[in-house]
Image (cartoon, grey):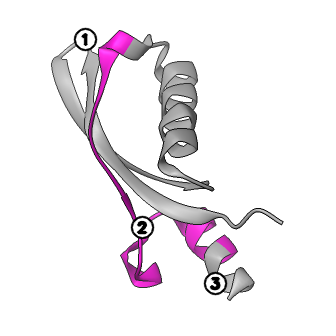
Amino acid sequence: MITQKVFKVAGVMKSSFGWQRFTKYVLAPNEKVALERIYSIIGSKHRLKRFQIKIQEIKPVENTEEIQDPIIRSFVEQKV
């Protein structure tokens, strides 16, 4: 069974007003998969290409209270 970790991904994305900051929490087995999921989520939601999204930080979340997304938080709390 593959263990899923929560990753906090922060960066900037191109918008009609310039570059906009974002922070997302995703479940993934490793950083590479987390990065691909971020590209997929932001690209489909905002109709952006990969070169319009710049990732500044990817780090695993150790403390579940740090997670701001209620769906990810409830999933993690159910697993524990």
- Residue 63 point in image, percent of width and height: 40, 82
Q: Which residues are magenta?
A: 51-75
- Which residue is labeled 1 in the image? 16
Vertical comparison of 63 with 16: above or below: below
Residue placed most toward the observer, 4 or 74: 4
Indicate left or right for 32 with 56 as reference.
right
Q: Residue furthest left?
A: 18
Residue at position x 63%, y 76% in the image: 76
The residue tagged 2 is: 68
Tag 3: residue type?
Answer: Glu
Q: CA distance from mark 1 to mark 3?
A: 37 Å
22 in relation to 36, above or below: below
Residue corresponding to mark 3: 77
Disc 2 secondary structure class = loop
Q: Secondary structure at mark 1?
A: loop
Quarter occupied by the N terminus: bottom right
Most extreme residue toward the right is 1
Which amino acid, by three-letter code, is at mark 2? Gln
| Residue in front for this viewpoint, 16 or 38 | 38
Tell me if residue 66 is in the magenta stretch. Answer: yes
**Pair 2/1: label in front:** 2
Residue 69 image point, x, y percent: 49, 63
Q: Secondary structure at mark 3?
A: helix
Determine whether 58 is above or below 45 in the image. below
Q: CA distance from mark 2 to mark 1?
A: 26 Å
* Front position among marks 1 and 3: 3
Q: Is residue 71 left or right of residue 22?
A: right
